[in-house]
Amino acid sequence: MESISIFDILKIGVGPSSSHTLGPWKAALRFVDELREKSLFEDVKRVNVILYGSLALTGKGHGTDLAVLMGLSGADPETVPLEEINSVPEQVSKTNRLRLGLDSEISFDPEVDIIFKKQERLPYHSNGIKFIAFGEFEDLHSSTYFSVGGGFIVHESESEGQAAEGVENVPNPCVNAAELLVYCDGKSISDVVLENERVWRSDAQIGDRLDQLWEVMKASVYSGCHTEGKLPGGLDVSRRASKISQKLLVKNDIDDVDKWTDRIRTHFYDFSDIIKLIGCFSMAVNEENASFGRIVTAPTNGSAGVIPAVLFYLVCFGKKETTREDIHRFLLTAGQIGILFKIGSTLSAAMGGCQAEIGVSSAMAAGALTEALGGSPQQVLMASEIAMEHHLGLTCDPIGGLVQIPCIERNSMGAIKAVTAATIALASDPGDAKVSLDSVIKSMWETAKDMNSNYKETSLGGLAVNVSVKISEC
């Protein structure tokens, strides 16, 4: 396993799903790069895309078809204007033509050239996607990728340890929590992580990137708290964050996110209202995510609301004054906890159920909050363990294959559990703990392997089959 940067765990992307939207998008981008590297790009006349397993079963609900079109067209999910996510696929469907890699125009009929193999699962991973490029008279090149969770993709020729932009010579290499603690001799976890990150980036670059992540998180919370209406996808789910925030904030008329945050921070709220606001913040992000908005994958899109909500809790209620360094330490610590789960278990709901998404994000947020509030490295890991322990076995059963029900509310539950876990850990002696974070990570992976495949993001079990809904036209 190569070393993983926290910026592989926390990355800017587009919703609604890291494994079903962001992953296929990145795979399509990489396939176009392959064609260029092999000097085949100019000869391509048509492309087929074949989706397997979970990608096929819930791909329509997650916008996998749209993501593939955007990736093949060469758009960057971090910077693409959000309106193009609808306009580009609409144009392709209308004309049956696609600008491959923002350059060469080819024939592409989404109804024919995107194939959903719902009954077939490739051996390596449930989220399989195959690209085939055709020339005038022959097949030119094909590649298969696997979207393994959190926006990570693996080519068929690679092992999962090669999925990230990793290196092997970080100063503090660790594959589990016990090893991490060895490096925390007189240092905080964020100190240890920062030393590793310097292998990839300068301190200024690390700080700037952390600032970017926080800006996107703030923007998604703010936008979600100021946007009303129905979520796309045909379930007719109403946005709720805006109505909740309007009731709690009285005046919701500030058009600047920092001033808006300051108003929340300086107003007095009782315990009940703080709980409501934490839930509101997390739902706001995931309502943006469900609407193909720009969010921070943390560690997945489906669980993207937990960490921003808990970070907002820190800024608004956790400390009297929160500095830029506090926010950086929070994000560095959160990213490292995510790395431990990535290495020791999975971040993919298609492999591990929702415990791999909401559970992991809650553990990341709990540990990060504990660090930001002055907890020891042992208390940080204890908080992460507590949060994950109470998500073990959580299934992924999205109704209609959409990241809406029960996903949006689950983010609220994960955020509240994270705050609770941090509170318990900060008041406890980790030496008295009977369960370690490493044992919970191991238990999560064993639970994932034992879990029935119907409960792994297929919409073939649980709420997805026991709740009768009629999906209207999108």
Image (cartoon, helix red, strand yellow):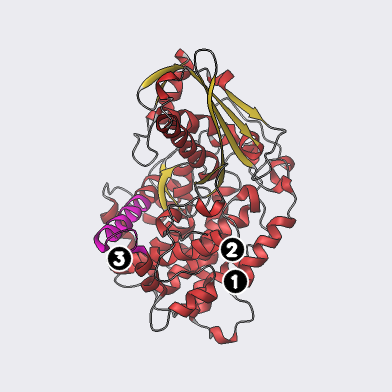
Secondary structure beneath dot 2 equals: helix
Q: Is the magenta stretch mostly helix, strand or loop?
A: helix
Secondary structure beneath dot 3 equals: helix
**271 vs 103, nearest the viewer:** 103
Q: Is residue 235 left or right of residue 278?
A: right
Q: Residue at x 41, y 51 (%)?
A: 11
Q: Please rate how many residues cluster around mark 2, counting C-alpha atoms within 10 Å: few if below 14, some from 14 to 19, many from 20.
A: some
Q: Which amino acid does label 1 sit on?
A: Asp
Q: Residue at x 46, y 39 (%)?
A: 26
> Measured from the top left, where is residue 62 in percent x and y?
55, 37
User: Which circle, 3 or 2, is nearer the viewer?
Assistant: 2
Residue assigned mark 2: 344
Task: Answer whether labels 3 and 1 touch (C-beta < 8 Å).
Answer: no
- Is residue 268 something that shows in the picture? no
Q: How far apart are marks 3 and 1 (CA)?
A: 39 Å
Q: What residue type is labelled 2?
A: Gly
Question: On screen, 192 above or below 222?
Answer: below
Quadrant in which residue 128 is drawn: top right
Residue assigned mark 1: 438
**208 vs 372, nearest the viewer:** 208
Residue 177: say if magenta: no
Q: Distance between the residues labelled 3 and 2?
A: 41 Å
Q: In which quarter of the image is the C terminus?
A: top right
Q: Give the range drawn in magenta.
A: 197-218
> Measured from the top left, where is residue 387 in percent x and y?
57, 67
Residue assigned mark 3: 266
Q: Which residue is drawn at 48% across and 74% down?
A: 180
> Measured from the top left, where is residue 154 in percent x and y?
54, 45
